[in-house]
Image: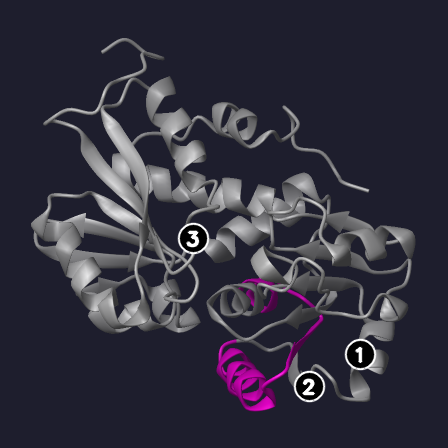
């Protein structure tokens, strides 16, 4: 196969995909299929809508069907751990996986979200995690990756805010055991959130607020944002969430979710194929600028 040849799906096509409960709007198929075509690989990436009670069967089915692996998305990133034969050290510590590789009959779990977040902040946001006073909104799989990534990369302090304070506190406790920086938790609707955000330099929104049927919502009131805050929203559809719009109006620098999708996806691509990901092709597929640059 020549480089750049678009292949048809046939009996020799290797299949990968994304497993989640709401995958219809996922851009991962566009991202990966563009990369496969660019390298002339007879691979295909599709979406698999899988409800919670079918997750184990879906994962076991990957090996049975001869698939090479899958990405794992909301709401399965934490639950998937129970059904894997092996996980990398970082995925085990984080407590969430977003990439599964099929090796023979074994399922191996990885977390590429953490590294993808750091790449997005550094390369597209122009933000270094070191010394940041970070606030993370959420306590699910994506928030877990963000918390461990930022704390491990040298953030000065990390605060996890979530509507369910118990989940935020449990995540903070888990992160605190692995790092030396200060890690705290707070309820999202608590009075202390205003103080926390006033002192923060980095805000990472890691919930589904602003996406799907919640497009009119923002996880954080715009009145709490200030020009000294860099705001990243992991939601990538829509590209401009209510949070990002209000953040820019408040004078914040901002970053949407597409760069993180790109970098975590590129790492997954390399795990599955053993080939270097064609990053520029993947950037083009997502409609990102041709070179990484700080967003404002």
Marks 3/2 in contact by CB < 8 Å: the verdict is: no
* Above/below status of 70 relative to 177: above
Q: Nearer the viewer, residue 143 or 274?
A: 143
* Above/below status of 94 relative to 130: below
Find out whether residue 2 is within the magenta segment: no
- As helix, strand or loop, the secondary structure at mark 1 comes to helix
Circle nearer the N terminus (3, 2): 3
Crowd class of label 1 (few under 14; some 14 to 19; many from 20; radius 10 Å):
some
From the image, which quarter does the C terminus lie in?
top right
Crowd class of label 3 (few under 14; some 14 to 19; many from 20; radius 10 Å):
many
- As helix, strand or loop, the secondary structure at mark 2 comes to strand
Q: Quadrant of residue 265?
A: top left
Label for residue 112? 3
Residue depicted at 88% across the width and 60% down the height: 228
Residue depicted at 71% across the width and 48% down the height: 255
- Tell me how far mark 3 sits from mark 2, CA to CA: 26 Å
Circle nearer the N terminus (1, 3): 3
């Amino acid at each position: 196969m020549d480089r750049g040849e678009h292949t048809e799906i046939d009996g020799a096509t290797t299949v990968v995909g994304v497993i989640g409960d709401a995958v219809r709007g996922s851009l991962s198929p566009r991202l990966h299929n563009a990369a496969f075509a660019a390298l002339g690989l007879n691979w295909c990436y599709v979406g698999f809508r899988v409800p919670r009670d079918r997750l184990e069967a879906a994962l076991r089915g990957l090996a049975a069907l001869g698939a090479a692996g899958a990405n794992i998305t909301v709401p399965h990133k934490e639950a998937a751990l129970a059904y894997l034969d092996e996980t990398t050290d970082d995925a085990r510590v984080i407590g969430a996986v977003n990439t599964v590789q099929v090796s023979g009959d074994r399922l191996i779990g990885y977390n590429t979200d953490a590294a993808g977040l750091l790449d997005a902040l550094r390369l597209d946001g122009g933000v270094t995690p070191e010394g940041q006073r970070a606030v993370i909104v959420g306590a699910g799989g994506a928030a877990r990756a963000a918390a461990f990534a930022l704390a491990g990369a040298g953030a000065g302090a990390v605060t996890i805010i979530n509507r369910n304070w118990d989940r935020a506190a449990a995540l903070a406790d888990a992160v605190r055991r692995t790092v030396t920086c200060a890690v705290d938790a707070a309820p999202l609707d608590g009075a202390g959130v205003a103080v926390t955000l006033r002192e923060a330099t980095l805000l990472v929104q890691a919930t589904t607020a602003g996406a799907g049927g919640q497009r009119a919502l923002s996880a954080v009131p715009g009145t709490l944002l200030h020009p000294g805050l860099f705001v990243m929203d992991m939601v990538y559809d829509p590209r401009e969430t209510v949070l990002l719009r209000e953040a820019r109006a408040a004078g914040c620098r901002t970053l949407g979710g597409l760069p993180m999708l790109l970098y975590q996806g590129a790492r997954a691509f390399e795990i599955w194929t053993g080939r270097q990901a064609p990053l520029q092709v993947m950037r083009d597929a997502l409609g990102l600028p041709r070179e990484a640059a700080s967003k404002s």
